[in-house]
Image (cartoon, helix red, strand yellow):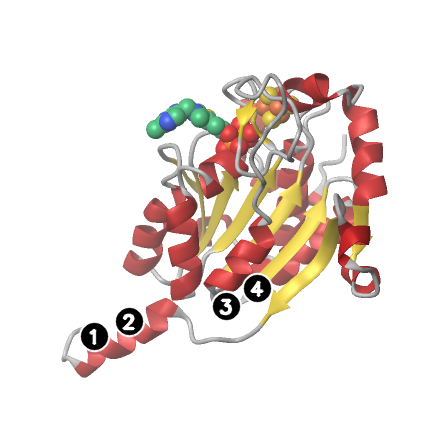
Amino acid sequence: MRAVPYESYLRTRRIPHIWCPGCGHGIVLKAMVRAIDQLGWKKDEIAMVSGIGCSGRAPGYVDFNTLHTTHGRAIAFATGLKLANPSLKVIVVTGDGDGIAIGGNHMIHAARRNLDLNVVLFNNFIYGMTGGQVSPTTPLGCSATTAPFGNYEHPFNIAELVAAAGGNFVARGTVYQPVELEKLLLKAFEKKGFSFVEAMSPCPTAYGRRNKLKGPVAMMVDLKERSVPLARAKNLAEPELEGKIVTGVLLDRDKEEYTEIYRKLTARLGGA
Ligand SMILES: Cc1ncc(C[n+]2csc(CCOP(=O)(O)OP(=O)(O)O)c2C)c(N)n1
Ligand code: SF4
């Protein structure tokens, strides 16, 4: 059988993966690997770092330099890695729990510093790995093991949070539109400075079953119906955007990158 072009990036001996049937995480990983393949990056120049969660398992399946760290600390490890070796292309894979609950402070400060990291957050609205607890993106009223009568907390709009914190690039895509997602990832990976892609990825097991979304296909249809490209969203009033997922490039700018500022400072002080 003919190998797909990006297959050399995969640790095929680790497959089958652990993700449930219908989980969106594999689609996000495939879009990432296809984007990397288009960029022609060599395996050894990439470091993929994750925390803990179903999303955090992604680096186990790719043949890059990989680091599976502790829950919420992927960005902290990635920061050290990037500062020690700025030539590495450092990609962080995280979940809505890992990246924006326990790891939220690392996220906003890495964005503020505009450190040259490529962060991909797999947003499935729930703590998938631990069986379905509320996360900071669980929609109001939705059911979770820790909210049996419905979630009574407002969720974060993660992409807007990160854009407000700093960084150079913020985008949002869904696994229902994998080609579009791949294009967004490609742009993010090419960007110097902090880039962030929020990839909406269904969790049929811990979120869908509990929220009357009857299976992976229904969850895909839900993503399709709720997605609105940014260009169209700009013509809609706020109430019309309630519950919608705005997709596309939400922020693209060119602030000076952190390791460059740092190197300039150390050079001025007579360091290496
Ligand atoms: C310090 C610490 N606290 C809690 C946990 C338990 N834990 C493991 S994964 C996880 C949540 C994962 O959710 P998310 O990051 O959204 O990823 P998903 O599994 O949904 O992809 C939690 C709470 C842990 N491993 N370490
Ligand atoms: S529990 Fe949810 S997030 Fe985890 S592998 Fe299964 S479907 Fe995916």
In terms of sequence position, does the residue under pointer 1 or pointer 4 come before the other?
Answer: 4
Depth order, front residue of 202/68: 202
User: Where does label 2 land, which residue?
Assistant: 262
Q: Secondary structure at mark 3?
A: loop
**Gap in angstroms between the C-alphas marked 1 and 4:** 27 Å
**Gap in angstroms between the C-alphas marked 1 and 2:** 6 Å
Q: Is residue 88 left or right of residue 135?
A: left
Asked whether the beta carbons under mark 4 and mark 2 sit within 8 Å of each other, the answer is no
Asked whether the beta carbons under mark 3 and mark 2 sit within 8 Å of each other, the answer is no
User: Where does label 4 land, which residue?
Assistant: 169
Asked whether the beta carbons under mark 1 and mark 2 sit within 8 Å of each other, the answer is yes
**Gap in angstroms between the C-alphas marked 4 and 2:** 20 Å
In terms of sequence position, does the residue under pointer 3 or pointer 2 come before the other?
Answer: 3
User: Where does label 3 land, which residue?
Assistant: 192
In terms of sequence position, does the residue under pointer 4 or pointer 2 come before the other?
Answer: 4
User: Where does label 1 land, which residue?
Assistant: 266
Amino acid marked by disc 2? Tyr
In this rendering, the label closer to the viewer, 1 or 4:
4
